[in-house]
Amino acid sequence: MFGIRYQQIPLHVLFEHQATLAGLGKIGLRSLKKHQQTQQTDWQSLAPINEVINPPSLELIDQYVRWSGAEASKYQASIPPHMVSQWGLSFAMRLLLQTNYPLSQVINQGVSLKVHGKIPRDQELLIQAKIANVDERNGLARVSVQITTGTIAQPELVETVLHMAFILPHFEKSKRTETTEHKTWQSLGEWSATADDGFKFALLTGDFNPIHWVGPLAKLSSFGQKVLHGFGMFARSYELLPETIQQIDVRFLKPVKLPSQHNQVEISTEPTQNYVRVVGSAGQICLTGQYS
């Protein structure tokens, strides 16, 4: 990924993330208040959100494309499907703020994309957002938020499902069982992340969770240092996949710590399915999933 290290992202792009920053502010205020256990909202009763928004500016799209490592010619007239993190996060927060979950402790578990068409750069975007599923088991609430992005004429161009989890008071950590794989993996390439890539991705998307860019606060987290956004890991890995993606479903297993070198993107092709994974410099599996 040549050229990424020296990319300078102008601070004025912050003004494009007002909805996301407002949502983060509300989450911060709620976490400061003394938490009172109230009856959990029935997620199925929450009304979906349907809104028309302006697309990101051409400057922001170009900066995002460059950061992700994509060829500039690939998205000359369209927006990368994984850039949904720029507008989708604010809609997800608006829905989740209506629940009783501890939003400041969200765990980003993965993302699913279905690409039906290209998102145009020059048209207003129709966003449809809803909580698609909630599964509370063993002290963990797994929440899926569906964000559908399109235009008035083509309302369903990209379907995104954000997979999140919230730790509940009676959570008990269970040991993950390791499964033996018999796949043959082929390396597609690698990407590296600099110490300030968390700040850069925050500038591009509005996700200013301090564990990604504030060193002293990140050291106090369970990761012990700054880590790249899950969506950032996903975007850079997506852009190394060989063919046009119609559907992809990935889970974030371990974070990419900042800085990090030589994160390998590997695929395994089988007759009925294609698999992808990201292997960190220490050999750890950071991301795994499948695509078609």
Image (cartoon, helix red, strand yellow):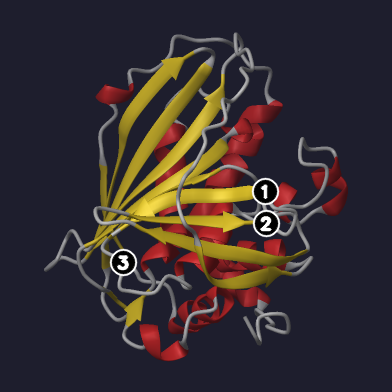
> Is residue 206 among the parts visible in the rendering?
no
| Residue depth check, mark 3 versus mark 1: number of the one nearer the observer | 1
Question: Mark 2 packing: few (<14 Cα in 10 Å), some, or many (20+)?
Answer: many
Real-space CA distance between mark 2 and mark 1, rounded to the nearest whole angstrom: 5 Å
Determine whether the residue tagged by mark 1 lies in a helix, strand or loop.
loop
Q: In this view, does 73 lie to the left or right of 210?
A: left
Residue drawn at x 37%, y 36% as measured from the top left: 144
Residues at discs 2 and 1 in contact (Cβ within 8 Å): yes
Q: What residue type is labelled 2?
A: Gly
Q: In which quarter of the image is the C terminus?
A: bottom left
Determine whether the residue tagged by mark 3 lies in a helix, strand or loop.
loop
Real-space CA distance between mark 3 and mark 1, rounded to the nearest whole angstrom: 25 Å
| Residue depth check, mark 3 versus mark 2: number of the one nearer the observer | 2
Question: Mark 1 packing: few (<14 Cα in 10 Å), some, or many (20+)?
Answer: some
Q: Mark 3 points at which residue?
A: 245
Q: Is residue 155 left or right of residue 193?
A: left
Q: What residue type is labelled 1?
A: Gln
Could you say which is closer to the camera, residue 40 or residue 19? 40
Picture quarter containing residue 143? top left
Q: Name the residue under label 2.
A: 280
Q: Mark 1 points at which residue?
A: 284
Mark 3 or mark 1, which has the lower sequence index?
Answer: 3
Real-space CA distance between mark 3 and mark 2, rounded to the nearest whole angstrom: 23 Å
Picture quarter containing residue 4? bottom right
Depicted 244 relative to depicted 222: above or below: below
